Amino acid sequence: MSTGLDNRAAGTRAVAWIRRVQIASVVTWSLLAAVVIVNALVQPTFFTLYSITSTFATFVPLVFAAVAQAIVVIGGGLDLSIGTIVALSSVVALKVMNGSDALIGLGFLAALATGALCGLVNGILVAVVRLQPLIVTFATASVFGGVTLVVLPSPGGAVPPAMSQGFRLAFAGVPVPVWCVLAAAAIWLALSRTRFLRHVYAVGGDALAAFASLVPVVRIRALSYVVAGALAGLAAMGVLGNTGSGDPFIGADIALDSIAAVVLGGIALRGGRGGAIGAIAGAIILALVTNVLFFLNVPTTFRELASGLVIIAALALSVLTTRKAVVR
Amino acid sequence: MSAVPATTDRTAARLRQAARNPVVIASLIAIALVVVGQLVSPGFGSYNQIISMLRIASFLGIIAIGQTIVILSGGDGIDLSVGKVATLGAIIGARVMDGTDANLAGGILIPLVVGAAIGLVNGLGIVYLRIPPFVMTLGMLGVVQGIILAYTGGTAAGRAAPFLTELVNTRWLLGAPGVLFLWVLLIVVVTLVLRRTRPGWNLYAVGSNRTAARLSGIRVNATVIGAYVASGVCAVLAGLALLGYTESVFLNLADDYTLPSIAAVVIGGTLIAGGVGGYLGSAIGAVVLSVLQSLLTTLNMPESHRTIVNGVILLALLALYGRQRKLRS
Amino acid sequence: MSLLTMTGVSKRYGGVRALDGASFELEAGEVHGLLGPNGSGKSTLNKVLAGTVNPDAATIVLDGRPVEIRGPRDAAARGIAAVYQQLSLVDSMTVGQNLVLGVEPSRAGFVSNRASAAEIDAVLERMRRGLGPGVTAGTEVSGLSPGQQQLVEIAKAVLRKPRILILDEATASLHRDQVNLVFEIVRELTAAGTCVVFTSHRLEEVRTICDRATILRTGRTVATVTVAETTESELVRVMVGDVAQPERRTATPSTDEVVLRVRNLSAPGVHGIDLDVHRGEILGLGGLQGQGQSELLLALFGATATPSGEIDVNGRRVTNSSVVRATGNGFALVPGDRGSQGLFMQRSIQENLSIVSLRRRLLAALGISMRKERTVAEDAVQRLRIKIGGLDDPVTTLSGGNAQKIVIAKWLLNEPAVVLLDDPTKGVDISAKAEIYSIIRELSSAGVAVILNSSDDVELAELCDRVVVLYEGRVRTHLVGDEITSENLVSAALLIGEGDQGTVEEQPAAADGGAR
């Protein structure tokens, strides 16, 4: 083969690669860069270790929830119950650990199991009973929320001291919350190399084609909710580490924010496209927008409208650009 | 052949059909709940108690009008912004009325226009930007919440006009307040619009099969946008009725009505996929939910158990009516 | 011994027999064609073999042992792979991911890309001439042209190393070079012992690649021939059979008055179509299915994006830029798939009948008078002899023929000037068919311009005054009056005696730019 052809092939390969990196993720990363720069401008202490620790600490739960939501959405579903799964897992783990440092490991296991179990309920209802995901998870959200209140009727209880203190430490010069975000990314990167996730993409992209290619569609769909539930369990441990105590109402905003993060991250809600790294960026954008509005001294009463409009604008931008990337 | 067995056959068939009709099922559930309530706590089924439960149900019922229409329009139609829009309607209404009947007309019309505008934006985004309905209305929920905070500055001001309060809280005819008669009127009007007007039939057609609707010369986009506008208007109407009930407003007055409004529609037998159902069912669904709430309260069931029961009931009914087609090659 | 025999294969869809005791035999290492006119059951037979259709009865013997093929998974396990015209690729994934979808090599749950990379690259390299230089394992499928996607689909089947490969119209979207490439690959496969079942609307392709061919007619096997020893006219005669020529309609006095005049109409799937429909005339659209007939009707009806060309009705220029406009201009379309395009399944018969023409009978431009609706609906039911239980029953209670009559009736209530019928008797039983014929005849005698697309050649011969035969989106042949016979229709559809069979639509491939 001539080298000329090789070069041309390399060129088209580069074009294909750029096309694959999709316009949507360009939007995501530009938004992230913009938010970080603005934040650094309005908050001079932004890059200090203390500030990074506390900023990252607040959005660790959302980062894990966003990865969970990303998996479900890529598979063509939706999980509005992620927030209450986080709440339920956190109160169960809190009870299991009972404030004792020795039981932290058991707490992690309890949170993971609770989350996975909730996810299994969703998965069975959506994939096997074949109910519409939006309404199912709306309904299970209220069930899980109720169970949370049964386990812990009012905010309180103490997280093992090693956990809440450890969450504020730095490890090898890098704050633990930053490690947590990196761990979320690492979990995603590992998952994205599995056969399971490959099939999740196929089911979300075109369930009929996947079925025709002998992908076990029902099992994959159900499993995507289970994995999401387990990740919500990890988010719950982040919540406990950050707040230091239990709160049955903690999950209220997480479900909607995780969906916003997913859309901001360039994941098509139709399913089959995007990746959770984008969703992590989306979660960070959401958290930093609130931060920026605070340091800009926007009056509290206007803060919510401002953040609502910023998010809507970003959503519209993401939705519009993903559409353009799809239309040939 | 004699006519008698034929008639009994037909009666039996009709009975069987009725037993499968969600409206009948929902009505029976409502009646059963009242009977259980009366047994557990005598007085639960008294006339006054029933009227008072129906009054509470009317707020949810009016919100459910819009939710029914949006769900009927198909295409995964749903409006998650209704609760907040109702709250905003009440807040604006209270401000404009400011406790006097003189401002009543403006206090009703201005919020209704705002509600219609919000619905229009929802519809335009869904149809022309092709944003999925739940994302669009979810985003709208955030924006409306922001508008509420910006508009009120964090504290709600104003009061309901006395006429409005009277409409909702004063017994008028047969010991029932005016709002109940208004609701009954709305049930009749909405049912007539759905069953006996061209927009109504077009709505069912669009919800049942969008391709066939387009190929039958129906303006699908206009019908869908219209559904979301109707939803915004109905939400505001319910917000105003709630304002009459509470007289002064809170910043989260009607926020918790969104999930129940969807539940009422599902209990009433309207297909989540669209195209089948009606408002009478949703109205009865609203009654079922309200009676259930009072019953659970009477039973001293804690909030936590109540939300669990609500969720499980919704899931059970969904599994009964709302299953999707199996994946076949 | 033959590798596979299928005997007594029967399948009914509702009242229609798609397969009626068909049989079929495959030798190892051969390319076996399946031939037959529209509706002869080729596709159904393929699907039975691939496990996607459950037959009502069938005896399948593979390697001398009787087997039952219970589903696609079962078929795959027995080494049967199928490629259809509609694709089973996931658009949003890459070529490489699609090629190994469902059979990804993995270790401890992790996909090992390295294990499959060599295989993927090899098969892509084999397809290189057809794919163009830009297509790599990392290219997203959505960026490929239809022809390139079809090649990837074939590659996907080949990668699974089947013993029996079914190619069902799998070459339809390919251009000539790509078809040749597929043939080379097919020959390599058969040399290694695989056998290939081949179906194509291009007879020339069947004659090029197939060793033997089985000919089906109305769900039955009528002959198995050695292709090289059979002439085209013999093939056509076997396909058509010795059917008595149907009673031709008594020629209605069609006038020179043109009701519908179409010039240079182009839309997705159709190119530069000219048509004239005279008063009192039924114009037929012939050819094999999927050659642009439905697309032409949809374009006339304003239902496809951006059609170009001129349409005149009774000398008046009309712009059918949307269905709403077309309906206003007096057009009506009975669409090809009544379930998904024509009917509101969960709604009542009454509503289905009224919906199009409601606005003619409104009270105060809004309200519906049920009395009026009942009257017109009952009248239509009677006039079209539709058998229903009651007007309030859902349309799902109706048989295929009666459901189709509902779709026709809803348009007749709107008093159209131009009626477009897309295969109106598909899946309809004999008696309803005859009744639909008489409705169509009445329409045309009443001065309505009728265009009828039909997959049934006998139907075209029986009903139409003129037939245009379409091939890949263009008008290929005009048949008038007595020229409309099943034999002529089949020959015209297969382009026999045309000489220029090679005029195949070139698919401009996105990444083809720098090829060669």
Image (tube, rainbow, N blue to C red):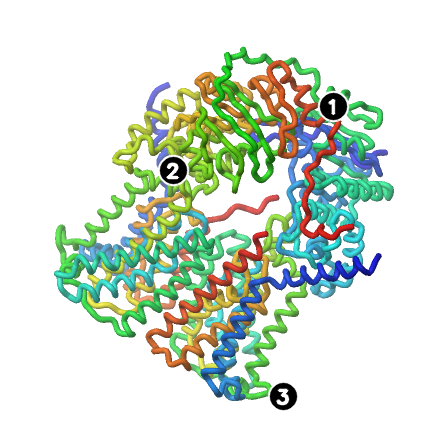
Residue B119's x, y, as percent? 35, 55
Instruction: Kindly state the secondary structure of the residue where label 2 is placed.
Output: helix
Asked if the residue at tag 2 contacts the one at tag 1, i.e. Cβ–Cβ closer than 8 Å, the answer is no
Amino acid at the residue labelled 1: Gly
In the image, residue A173 lies at what x, y percent? Answer: 61, 88
C-alpha separation, residue under disc 1 versus residue under disc 3: 82 Å
Q: Which of marks 3 and 2 is in front?
A: 3
Task: Answer whether labels 1 and 3 touch (C-beta < 8 Å).
Answer: no
Q: Where is mark 3, residue-wise?
A: A172
Identify whether A131 is placed above or below C264: below
Say which residue label 2 marks.
Answer: B17
Residue on which disc 1 sits: C497
Query: Disc 3 marks which amino acid?
Result: Ala
| Pick the front one: C87 or B304 | C87
Neighbour class for label 3 at 10 Å: few (<14), some, many (≥20)? few
Nearer mark to the viewer, of 1 and 2: 1
Q: Which amino acid does label 2 sit on?
A: Gln
Q: Which residue is drawn at 41% across and 37% down?
A: C347
Chain of the residue on which disc 2 is drawn: B
For residue C383, side relative to residue A162 (left or right): left
Residue A212 position within the rendered picture, expressed as x and y whole percent measured from the top left: 65, 47
* Image coords of residue C374 (percent x, y): 33, 28
Would you identify the image quadrant in which residue A150 lies? bottom left
Q: How many labels does the image show?
A: 3
